[in-house]
Image: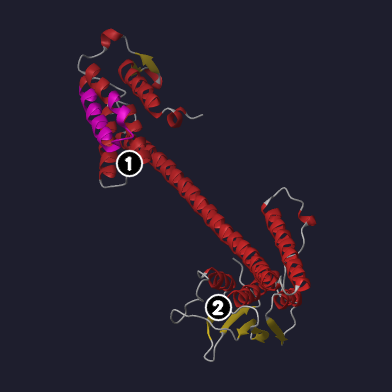
Amino acid sequence: MNPFTAWPRAADAVLAFVAFLLTVFLKDGPGDSLLIRPLGEVSLLVLPVSAAGAAALYWRRRGPLIVLGVALAVWAVTIVGGGEQGGLTVLIALYSVGRHGAVNRYVPMGITVAVILLGIDGRDDAAPWLEVVIVGILFMFGSWYVGRRLRLRGERAAQLLREQTAESRRILAEERTRIARELHDVVAHRVSLMTIQAGAAKAVAAQDLDGALQAMGAVEQAGRQALDELRHLLGVLRPETDLDGLGPQPGLADLPRLLAQIRAAGVEVALVADVAPDGLPARVDLFAYRIVQEALTNVLKHAGPGARAEVRLGAGENEIVIEVLDDGTAVMAGPGAVRAGTGGHGLVGMRERALLLGGTVDARPRPGGGFRVVAHLPTEGRPT
């Protein structure tokens, strides 16, 4: 565990104390060696100034540029007072500017001043002054650059984490929307059938007991089918479920069964197919079936038993065209509105499905009465 990340304030306090000890009690020895300075050799000027410069490192995260200015001033004073290790605090301050500060015009100014002070501090060395300056540039700029690179790397990691979090939220939202659509399709269609059949059974129970029993049998069948579809959907939501035991999603090949259910509920519906229902991508096949299912469910709910409907399947250029017509009466609230009482969820669901494939859905009343739903779905349904 990195102590500067886990305990930043405590780590900075320790760093400041160590920098103070090294600045005050470390001195150059023969042959580029380092020696411990006796306490009696410590200048009364260097001691408090070095303490102030080292203490400033405690705030190197909050005000790195100010800390750098203090460190440079302390180094200049220690040079005058005979100190020899004031550059250590400046190196730490330059690193802190790169790691925690922004890039501005004061950064190159601070590096320049640090190099000049290093040249002055090393004026008694045997090495040429130019060599000292070049080494100083490398060390001073390098300290700042290392901090800067670590800052950029941390920002990139944080940005990547934010993007991954946003992507996870987007995927979760899309999945919730998909689940909501599937639940709506299953529940609305089956419950609508059950409601119509139960109402018919109630209406004829006194005069036609056999007819009532037949209608209630249809209610039971629709309820079982609704439970089966809900179990299938919930099984898909459970990762630990054995997917091999799940049945396939419905498609246009299942339209005859869907139309039989609608007819059993009292709506006469015909199918005109100018295109083979097989060979479509699974997503397009499923969405096309759901659009037909939702359109017929709306016919059943709003036109009611006795209405006539027609489902037409056609093929365009790289698309399948679905048209559902009925002769019922729809109460409209204006252009593009939905039938009264639907709340708009059915048509919204159809449009969302078509949009996910790059297609369109148009739903509006017919001039002569009734309702018309037309969907254009690309046969290559773009992935989402």
Frontmost residue, 177 versus 117: 177
Up-down relation of residue 214 to residue 275 (above or below): above
Q: Quadrant of residue 78?
A: top left
Q: In the image, residue 91 lies at what x, y percent?
A: 34, 32
**Residue under the image location 62 percent in, 61 percent down:** 183
Apparent side of residue 195 relative to residue 145 in the rendered image (left or right): right
Q: Quadrant of residue 298?
A: bottom right
Frontmost residue, 36 versus 344: 344
Q: Which residue is mark 2?
A: 360
Q: Is residue 141 visible?
A: no
- Dividing the image into 4 quarters, which one contains the C terminus? bottom right
Q: Which residue is mark 1?
A: 101
Q: Amino acid at mark 1?
A: Gly
Apparent side of residue 148 relative to residue 242 in the rendered image (left or right): left
Q: Amino acid at mark 2?
A: Thr
**Residue under the image location 33 percent in, 34 percent down:** 61
Q: Main secondary structure of the magenta part?
A: helix
Q: Residue furthest front?
A: 206
Apparent side of residue 173 relative to residue 237 in the rendered image (left or right): left
How far separated are the C-alphas under marks 2 and 1? 52 Å
Q: Residue furthest bottom?
A: 368
Q: Quadrant of residue 361?
A: bottom right
Numbered disc in front, either 2 or 1? 2
| Range covered by the magenta-colored residues | 54-80
**Residue under the image location 25 percent in, 27 percent down:** 75
Up-down relation of residue 384 to residue 307 (above or below): above
Q: Which mark is residue 37?
A: none
Q: In the structure shown, which secondary structural element does the residue marked by tag 1 occupy? A: loop
Tag 1 or tag 2, which sits nearer the N-term? 1
